[in-house]
Amino acid sequence: MKTAYVLNGPNLNLLGTREPAVYGAATLADVQAMCEAAAAQHGLALVFRQSNHEGELVDWIHEAGRLHAQGQLAGLIINAGAYTHTSVALHDAIKGTGVTCIELHISNVFAREAFRHHSYISPVARAVMCGFGVNGYPQALEALAGMQG
Ligand code: DQA
């Protein structure tokens, strides 16, 4: 059984209370439960984490990269939050490990402020999803399960 990583960046621990008009009412625990159900449905083991610290996210991408090197990783879904728009380190970690990456955003970042329109993740992602609300998470897991390599 291959493993899917779902990594969440800064402020996503506040889901449920943070700008509910933008991000909805579901908490991160709700999102984790949705991901666990989707992973089980698609025959994937799941690692689901959140951090407010860029370096910790880099370390977890490296961890996923080691599984990738062993042929045990289905891929990585990352909602990097605001680091999406700032982090060369996350870009380099994804590129350097060669993991299959889906970039995910709950909101439609292109319908929001201009500073959210640029992503350091997109050029190193296999696919980009945004604007599906928290339903994007199980949808991304389904998509990952259907991807080859
Ligand atoms: C987000 C969009 C980002 O611009 C923002 O900084 C977030 C959440 C989203 O899921 O829509 O923290 O990644």
Image (tube, rainbow, N blue to C red):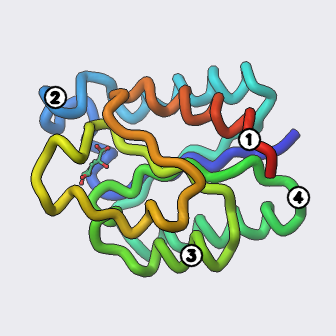
- Of circles 3 and 1, the one toward us is 1
- Of circles 3 and 2, the one toward us is 3
- Few, some or many C-alpha atoms within 10 Å of disc 1 (few <14, some 14-19, many ≥20)? few
The first of marks 2 and 1 along the sequence is 2
For the residues labelled 3 and 1, say whether their Cβ atoms are less than 8 Å apart: no
**Marks 2 and 1, how far apart at CA:** 32 Å
Q: Amino acid at mark 1?
A: Met
Residue matched to label 1: 147
The first of marks 3 and 2 along the sequence is 2
**Marks 4 and 1, how far apart at CA:** 14 Å
At x 47% / y 47%, what residue is drawn?
Answer: 128
At x 80% / y 62%, what residue is drawn?
Answer: 67
Residue 93 shows in this picture: yes
Query: What secondary structure is marked by label 3?
Result: helix
At x 27% / y 37%, what residue is drawn?
Answer: 107
Q: Amino acid at mark 2?
A: Pro
- Few, some or many C-alpha atoms within 10 Å of disc 2 (few <14, some 14-19, many ≥20)? few
Query: What secondary structure is marked by label 1?
Result: loop
Image: 101 above or below 41: below
Residue 39 falls left or right of residue 8: right
The first of marks 4 and 3 along the sequence is 4
Q: Position of residue 142 (x, y in %)?
A: 65, 29
Residue matched to label 4: 71
Q: Amino acid at mark 3?
A: Ala
- Of circles 4 and 2, the one toward us is 4
**Marks 3 and 1, how far apart at CA:** 21 Å
Q: Position of residue 76 (x, y in %)?
A: 62, 52
Q: Which dot marks residue 20?
A: 2
Q: Which dot marks residue 93?
A: 3
